[in-house]
Image: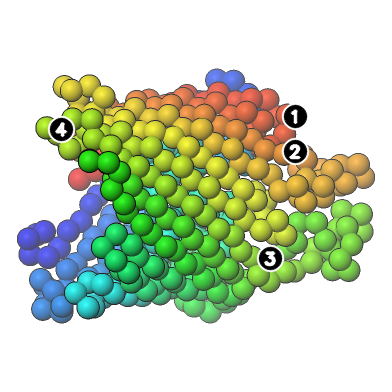
Amino acid sequence: MKEDGFDFVLNYTSEDLVAVRGGSSDALVHAGQASFTGQADLERLGGWNGAAVTLSISHRDGQGINARSGIGALLGPQEIFGRGNVARISQLWIDQKFMNDRLSLRFGRGNPGSDFEEFDCNFVNLSYCGNQVGNIVSDYWYNYPISQWGAIAKVKTGQKTYLKAGIYQVNPRNLKNGFLDVLSPSGGTGALVPVELGWSPRLGAAGQASMKFGGWYSTAARDDVYLDNNRGSAAQSGMPHLKKRGSYGGYASIVARFPTDTGDSSRNVTAFFNATLADTATSTVDRSFAVGVVWTGPISRRPQDQIGLAVSANHLNGRLADYRRERLALGSDDGLPGSGENAVELFYGVQVTRFLQVRPDVQWIHRPGGTSANPDAIIVGARTSISL
């Protein structure tokens, strides 16, 4: 089928975690996702040069340990959970390439988190899984499995560089739990415009890097985290928060890969650094940093096994902390003030068969929610993934 122009992947991923320290419960919490992703090469199938169609359908199940066990982290420790336990059309787009593949256009239903600052999801904590922007400003920048109408243009500016820009409709309808009704464009509240510059230089004789630098701007209205409609303290007045248009931010993602076995290119060490900054007017988390390393093939007899270690720092917006502090002084509980949280994650991935992988995992979260009032959490468990 692949030779004829049709390729697909079926996957089920299960993340089963226990909070052995911190939180309010030590129950085993399961979350999972089934997905189908297929791509049709229209050039092979029908002679349409440079065109392809992609369709992805997903269904999530289970609960989230962050709420179920009372962890209260700024970024969830169970990335596969969220956005409702329903079936969704997560991707449905058409790609068209021009000028010997130097220019590519994409239109349809997609996720900016899959199109910009693309990043592997090797870890379970959201601090190191997938696109960071969609993890900290998730009400208008959507990561998988949510999709939104959009268009992207990518230009290869050189052999190792590219420039990419997109525009997506911001629409709360996308978050509904329907399968088809979310596809309607009615109800849009603004536009999201991301841009990205990419560079893939060589590192020494055999190393390879991928560097992505980008930013975004959204015209959708969001609540100011501190001000009310009269531009005073919303905590003191009790009035509705000021609606502001023009949310924005920037990011940098650097990934470096070095082979560890000249006879087997699949064995390598990959190091990464991610930094994301969001505006302080409307964002709960205004900056996030993560650094880590993944070693593929640490044992010669187990070339597909992996060891991963990562550390993150996620910062609670100081203006939001001030709002919460003032509300707390008035006797209202609108969340605890604080500064930032840190997380460390370690896993060992066992490639049991060609299609089955099991990854025992441990996480330590310091000051969940950015406040020392929440006890540090230690979470253990495993991710199991079946791909066909």
The answer for how far apart the CA atoms under marks 4 and 3 are is: 52 Å
Disc nearer the start of the sequence (3/1): 3
Identify which residue is drawn at 55% across, 42% down. Answer: 289
The answer for how far apart the CA atoms under marks 2 and 3 are is: 22 Å
Disc 4 vs disc 3: which is toward the camera? Answer: 4
The answer for how far apart the CA atoms under marks 3 and 1 are is: 28 Å
Marks 2 and 1 in Cβ contact (< 8 Å)? yes
> Within 10 angstroms of label 3, few (less than 14), some, or many (20 or more) residues?
some
Determine the residue located farthest toward the front in the rendered image: 204
In the rendered structure, which amino acid carries the disc numbered 4?
Thr
Q: Which residue is mark 2?
A: 338
Instruction: Find numbered disc 2 in the image and state the secondary structure of the residue it sits on.
Output: loop
Q: Position of residue 172 (x, y in %)?
A: 57, 67
- The quadrant in which residue 328 appears is top right
Q: Position of residue 28 (x, y in %)?
A: 49, 27
Question: Is 147 on the left or on the right of 173, as rendered?
Answer: left
**Placement of 259 over or under 248, stated as above or below:** above
Q: Which residue is mark 3?
A: 222
Instruction: Find numbered disc 4 in the image and state the secondary structure of the residue it sits on.
Output: loop
